[in-house]
Image (tube, rainbow, N blue to C red):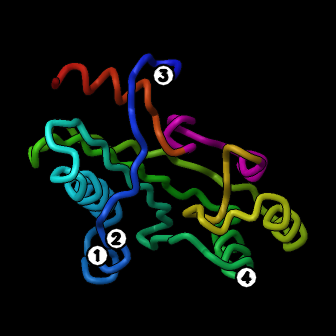
Amino acid sequence: MNQYDAAFKAVDHMFDETEAKQELKLPPKELSLYLARQKSLSLNKKFKDHVILGCDQICNLNGKIFSKPLTVEQAKLNLSELSGKTHQLIGSYSFTKNNEILFEDTLITNMTMKNLSKSEINDYVATDLPLTSCGSYMFEKNGYNLFSEVEGSLEAINGLPFGYLLNKLNKYV
C-alpha cells in the first residue's frame, strides 16, 4: 500500500515507443497522449479486468522534442539548448480496462531554466547523471536548482501526479 491507499503493480509496457516516435508526425501534446494510451492498451490482454495506467512525458521547446539523452555529451547539449528558455514538460496519462479507455488527461508544466554556464551544466550532469530523463534533468534530485520558475504540478514533473489522477479516475470507475 501507499499514502493513497491504492493497490497497484508496476509493470513494463509492451509497446515500441521508439518506432512510434520516429513514424508519427504528431504535435508534442498529441504524441504524449498517444504514447500513454498505447502503453496502457499494450497490457490489457495480459491484465484482463484490471484498470491499467499508461504514462508518457515529453519535454518540448518550441515544437522540438527532447528525448532521453542516454549519453553525458547529449545531456550537456540538451541542457545548453534549454538554458535560459521556457519549455513545456507534457505528462499524459491513460487509464484503460479491457481495451476501453476509461479516462485520459494531459498536464502541462511550464518550466523556465536559469541561464546556465558550461561549468554549471557539466557539474549538474556529473552529479545527477540524468541520462534516462527527458529534458536531461532530474527535478526530483538536484534538477530543481536549474530552474528560475515553474508553473504547474510538481508531482507531474516528477513523473506521476498520483493523488490527482486517482481522484479523477474515481469519477469514472
Which residue was labeled with disc 1? Answer: 20
Which residue was labeled with disc 2? Answer: 17
Q: Count of labels shown?
A: 4
Q: Say if mark 3 contacts mark 1, CB within 8 Å.
A: no
Residue found 57% across the figure and 43% down from its top: 158
Where residue 9 appears, as percent x and y from the top left, is 40, 38
The amino acid pointed to by label 2 is Glu
Where residue 141 appears, as percent x and y from the top left, is 74, 46
Measured along the vertical axis of the image, is residue 7 above or below residue 72? above
Query: Residue 39 vs residue 134: left or right?
Result: left
Which residue was labeled with disc 4? Answer: 73
Quarter of the view holding residue 100: top left
- Residue 143 located within the stretch drawn in magenta: yes
Residue found 85% across the figure and 71% down from its top: 122
The amino acid pointed to by label 1 is Ala
Q: Judge the density around disc 1: few (<14), some (14-19), many (≥20) Cα neighbours within 10 Å.
A: some
Q: Nearer the viewer, mark 4 or mark 3?
A: 3
Q: Judge the density around disc 3: few (<14), some (14-19), many (≥20) Cα neighbours within 10 Å.
A: few
Query: Residue 40 vs residue 172: left or right?
Result: right
Marks 4 and 3, the one that precedes in the sequence:
3
Measured along the vertical axis of the image, is residue 159 above or below residue 161? below
Which residue was labeled with disc 3? Answer: 1
Q: Which residues are magenta?
A: 142-158
Marks 3 and 2, the one that precedes in the sequence:
3
Q: Say if mark 2 contacts mark 4, CB within 8 Å.
A: no
Query: Residue 21 vs residue 150: left or right?
Result: left
Q: Judge the density around disc 4: few (<14), some (14-19), many (≥20) Cα neighbours within 10 Å.
A: few
- The residue nearer to you, when weighing 106 against 130, is 130
